[in-house]
């Protein structure tokens, strides 16, 4: 009879252990979801901060604003110093949007968010200056991102 009680105890212990494993897995799953949401939130905040900083830099610097305006229309109108600043601006632009593309590929940002940024990318790529200076930047960009940009339809 004591053997039977020991077998029953072992069976009950197995059930308790299995239940504990299931509860642990549920907890881990909830923590992963919570962590994923936090990472996505941080990614979106970083993107928003980068965008705001870039826009405020242009808005608060009349010379840079003029360089971007002229460069987008016709980079040949720029002096060599202005052309250099425009190249740096465009490099920052492409690298920033490449980062957003990569975060989209990692599923850290939602598809509708990526689509809104793709609209911006394609809009900029259809401007004369960004398209003309594209060869100066494409060689330092991820090939997958470059392929996305090059599929943009001119407006």
Image (spheres, rainbow, N blue to C red):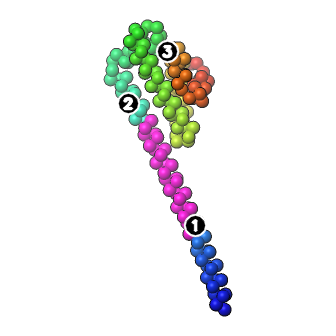
Q: For the magenta stretch, what is the residue range? A: 19-47
- Which quarter of the figure is the C terminus placed in? top right
- The residue indicated by pointer 2 is 53
The secondary structure type at the circle numbered 1 is helix
How far is mark 2 from mark 1, CA to CA? 47 Å
Would residue 46 be seen by someone viewing this image from the given angle?
A: yes
How far is mark 2 from mark 3, CA to CA? 22 Å
The secondary structure type at the circle numbered 3 is helix
Please tell me whether residue 50 is drawn above or below residue 5 in the rendered image. Answer: above
Would residue 69 be seen by someone viewing this image from the given angle?
A: no
> How far from the left and from the top, in percent, is residue 5?
63, 87
The secondary structure that most of the magenta stretch takes on is: helix
The secondary structure type at the circle numbered 2 is helix
Identity of the residue drawn at 45% across and 14% down: 71
> How far from the left and from the top, in percent, is residue 27?
52, 61
| Left or right, residue 38 beside residue 135 | left
- The residue indicated by pointer 3 is 129
Task: Point out the tag, 1 or 3, that comes first from the N-terminus.
Answer: 1
In depth, the one of 137 and 70 nearer the eye is 137
Rate crowding at label 3 as few (under 14), some (14 to 19) or many (20 or more) other CA atoms within 10 Å: many
Task: Point out the tag, 2 or 1, that comes first from the N-terminus.
Answer: 1
> How far from the left and from the top, in percent, is residue 6?
63, 85
Identity of the residue drawn at 42% across and 31% down: 51
Please tell me whether residue 35 is drawn above or below residue 83 in the rendered image. Answer: below
> How far from the left and from the top, in percent, is residue 102?
54, 35
Please tell me whether residue 95 is drawn above or below residue 40 in the rendered image. Answer: above
Please tell me whether residue 76 is drawn above or below residue 115 in the rendered image. Answer: above
In depth, the one of 139 and 146 nearer the eye is 139
**74 falls in the magenta region:** no
């Amino acid at each position: 009879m004591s053997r039977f009680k020991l077998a029953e105890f072992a069976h009950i212990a197995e059930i308790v252990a299995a239940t504990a494993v299931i509860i642990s897995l549920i907890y881990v799953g909830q923590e992963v979801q919570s962590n994923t949401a936090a990472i996505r939130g941080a990614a979106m905040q970083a993107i928003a901060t980068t965008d705001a900083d870039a826009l405020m830099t242009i808005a608060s610097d009349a010379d840079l604003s003029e360089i971007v305006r002229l460069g987008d229309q016709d980079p040949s109108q720029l002096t060599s110093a202005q052309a250099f600043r425009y190249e740096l601006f465009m490099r920052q632009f492409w690298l920033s949007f490449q980062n957003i593309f990569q975060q989209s590929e990692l599923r850290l940002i939602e598809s509708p968010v990526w689509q809104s940024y793709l609209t911006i990318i394609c809009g900029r790529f259809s401007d004369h200056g960004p398209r003309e200076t594209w060869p100066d930047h494409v060689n330092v960009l991820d090939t997958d991102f470059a392929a996305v940009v090059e599929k943009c339809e001119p407006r």
